[in-house]
Image: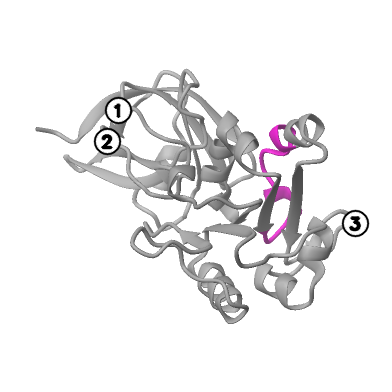
Amino acid sequence: MSNWIDGKVVENIHWTDTLYSLRVEGDVQPYKAGQFGRLGLEIDDEIIGRPYSFVSSPDEGFHEFYSISVAEGALSPRLAELKAGDHVYLGKKPNGFLILDEIPESEDLWMLSTGTGIGPFLSILKTDQAWTRFKKLVLVHAVRNAAELAYRELIDELSAKHPDQFCYVPFVSREKTDFSLHGRIPAGFKNGSLEKRAGIKVEEGKSQIMLCGNPDMVKDTRELLQNRGLTKNLRRTPGSISTENYW
């Protein structure tokens, strides 16, 4: 039985020359916010597919995926060219454990992302569960250039709706702005600027940290937090640091 189903592009939103979001209709199996699906196209008589996190929440009427077009990639440049009405394959079964059901109880939830890794966290933030479980939610998004800070309208809506509960912290590494922190997320922890901006400290037993994005960011941040006494969150041994591995 094929693991693919037919999907139809509803919209292709271009944020920059390389960043885009595909909205697709298709009858995939039910998923939870934070999980990932697959997108595929038939190339040279075979379906080439890659995993992409859902940006949409499970109850939206379409499936949204945030991606970057990699020039040498076999799939992403072709996905970036799709238009409304075009055909695309969808993975039938969603996967992934970067979901709130796998996160132990805590006061604060930190969602640390780079680039398109912000996708699953936006899906989570669209659900009621996120806002009823945690006193404070911190969304951190690190990019190279300010133009890559996508989904600002949605983030501004969340900030306006939950002004005392939600904190958005952008990082920009290759240019300086008057609204973002400069550099990388691990450095922001080391020099204290990240926690100062968020207004709270990451603490074992009080904070849960979810990481998604560049493997170097995930590795460096995880090691830094483990040196501060936080532990990896595993089903058999619950802890404070959760990551998704589909790179």
Left or right, 61 with respect to 48, comes to right
* Image disc number at residue 70: none
For label 3, the crowd category at 10 Å Cα-Cα, with few meaning under 14, some 14 to 19 and many 20 or more, is few
Q: Is residue 127 visible?
A: no
Q: Position of residue 186 (x, y in %)?
A: 66, 73
Give the answer, above or below, for where 57 lies relative to 174: above
What x and y, as percent, mark residue 65? 48, 37
Looking at the picture, tell me which residue is in the foreground, 22 or 108: 108
Badge 3 vs badge 1, beta-carbon distance below 8 Å: no
Amino acid type, mark 3: Asp
What residue lies at 50% left-to-right and 52% top-to-bottom?
104
Q: 47 or 240: nearer the eye?
A: 240
Magenta stretch contains residue 149:
yes
Q: In what quadrant of the picture does the N terminus appear? A: top left
Q: Is residue 59 visible?
A: yes
Give the mark nearest the N terminus, 2 or 1: 1
Outermost residue on the right side: it is 178
Q: Amino acid at mark 2?
A: Lys
Q: Nearer the viewer, mark 3 or mark 1?
A: 1
* Marked residue nearer the N-terminal end (3 or 1): 1
Q: Which residues are magenta?
A: 143-155
Q: Earlier in the sequence, mark 3 or mark 2?
A: 2
Task: From the image, tell me which residue sits under label 1.
Answer: 29
Question: In the picture, residue 124 is in which quadrant?
Answer: top right
Q: Position of residue 148 (x, y in %)?
A: 67, 50
State how far apart marks 2 and 1 are (Cα): 6 Å
Q: Which quadrant would the C terminus be assigned to in this image? A: bottom left
Q: Are marks 2 and 1 in contact (CB under 8 Å)?
A: yes
Which one is in front, 180 or 192?
Answer: 192
Point out the frontmost of discs 3 and 2. Answer: 2
**Residue hosting label 3:** 178
The residue that label 2 is drawn on is 93
